[in-house]
Amino acid sequence: MRRIIAARQDGLCSRLGAILNAMYISKKTGKDFYYYWPESEEQMKLWENIKNKNNFRSIECELEKNIFSNNFIQNYSLGDTFQNPGLPYGLKQPKFSFKASLDELALRNEDCFISHVPCYSYIEDIDKEEYYREMKAFWRQVEFTSKIQEIIQTAKAKADKLDNFIAIHVRIADVALNQAYKNTGYFVYKFSPLELVFELIKQEIQDYNIVLFSDDFDGIKILKNYCLENNFKKVYLIDEFIKINLNSETERAFFELAFMICAKKIYTGDSNFSKFASRVGLGREATYISEVFSNQERYDLIFKNKNNKLKLKPLQEAYKFLYLYTRGKLIKRSWVELEQILVQALALDPFNNLYKIGILECLLNQKNYMHAEEYTKKIIKDNNFLKDLLHPMMIFKDSFFKILSSVDNQYENLYLLYLTMSKKFNFKIKGAPARVKKHLAYKLGQAMIENSKNILGYIRMPFVLMKIYTRYKKEQKTYRILINVNSNLLLPKLKEYADYKEALKLKEHLSYKLGEALIKANKNWYNGGYIKLWFEILKLKKT
């Protein structure tokens, strides 16, 4: 018999959620339950520097000995040696890449790694209502240290005293500033603009007390003060209830968690912290703040109120504009308007290539190709630009490539971006004939044909050919410099293009053959290369 193992490596409630899920599947299949409690992910450790500078919350997890009882650890822990788990491990892989029944899991002679995602989303034969009942029960069965138990009981008593409250978890820090993904926009949907939260408070304030939770101490105070200015007196920060001595971020997290579990409703900006609290407290999923409003309503609320007092730190404000931009795209606002939104974002976060890519997308959709070409020429020199553009989590990847693929190849820097993205993401590319037309042989041959129609053309031809050759050498030198700086700019081989056969046909054209003959003659001028050229030209004209 193999084991059911919880093995998350990220935040506290992702780990706790995985543990409860593993306990549940263990009960349903008869297999033994275990868990890993590894060190925090590297990006979580790096966050500590940003956190300290901005008065944000920590996202690191403490050692298991500071959380669970000795008995719980001895019975179920596999230690902190994290192993790369297989399916169906969490959202690190596509949610529906794994499907199985409880019977299949019971019969499998292999370890099964369970995530924080509700089991019914990928395991058949699970009753949803029963699952949530069991989540509440298993939460009470987890054995914590005496200190954590005391904190949980204290928080519960304070929450019970307040009574009739809803919890709103406002996520506005890590998604906007975490270096691991802030330049990709990948988690923009988890961001909770304060304008939306304030509107939500307006809707709920008549019937409930409201307690605000957040990963940004300063930002949530701004929202609380704005509520007071609007005479909303039943809005509280969770800090107002923390009157006991908490020695660590983990202890504070357990206080907040135990308090939130007692709420009548829980709203989330998509955080596993508040989603876990809802599952074990309410026996259902938390309500997403974004789902309360349509895309149009979200756009209007932010756009109309973006100059009010709900202003955060510059990088967070920039990210709010990104959120506004993504909503604007969905409701099909004009590309001119969308461009101005990202211009404002870039002014607040000038080194974020995400906004530069978005501006390029706007310019291309406006068919402002010359401006887009010049802008690309300017920003492509930054090695980090391509790094961000080619990041697998880049949210503009597909839409940007789609519009980029429609641009004429005469815009060389844009075309270079197109080819680079094609190679990186294995997009089907076209443009082999255009590449051939940029070959020196084709350009020279074309010029020879165009300038052989009259006497004046023959007189002008040597100068035209020299100009083409000089320009070509300069372009090649620039290209070599670029690929030395960033190898991602190396063009794919012609045979890798979808229209490669058309390019081969183009190489058989008279213009290409003439150019090849001229290049060959120039290389062998001392052996009568140019005399031989005339015979080669006569031969080509006959074929």
Image: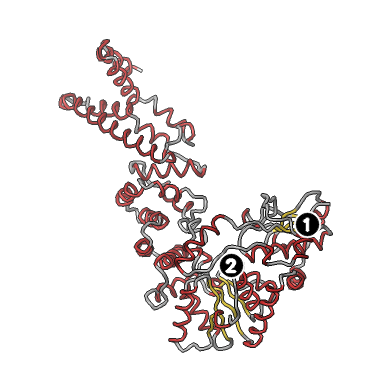
Of 57 and 298, nearer the camera is 57
Looking at the rendered structure, the kind of residue marked 2 is Ser
Q: Which residue is mark 1?
A: 101
Residue 382: percent from left, percent from top: 37, 48
Residue 219: percent from left, percent from top: 46, 74
Asked if disc 2 and disc 1 are in contact, CB closer than 8 Å, the reply is no
Residue 157, quarter of the rendered image: bottom right
For disc 1, the neighbor class at 10 Å (few under 14, some 14 to 19, many from 20) is: few
Looking at the rendering, in which quadrant would you find the C terminus? top left
Relative placement, left or right, of 264 versus 388 is right
> Under tag 1, what secondary structure?
strand
Q: Is residue 103 visible?
A: yes
> Under tag 2, what secondary structure?
loop
Q: Is residue 335 visible?
A: no
Relative placement, left or right, of 17 versus 399 is right
Query: Residue at 44% across / 82% down in the picture?
Result: 226
Q: Is residue 84 above or below residue 8?
A: above
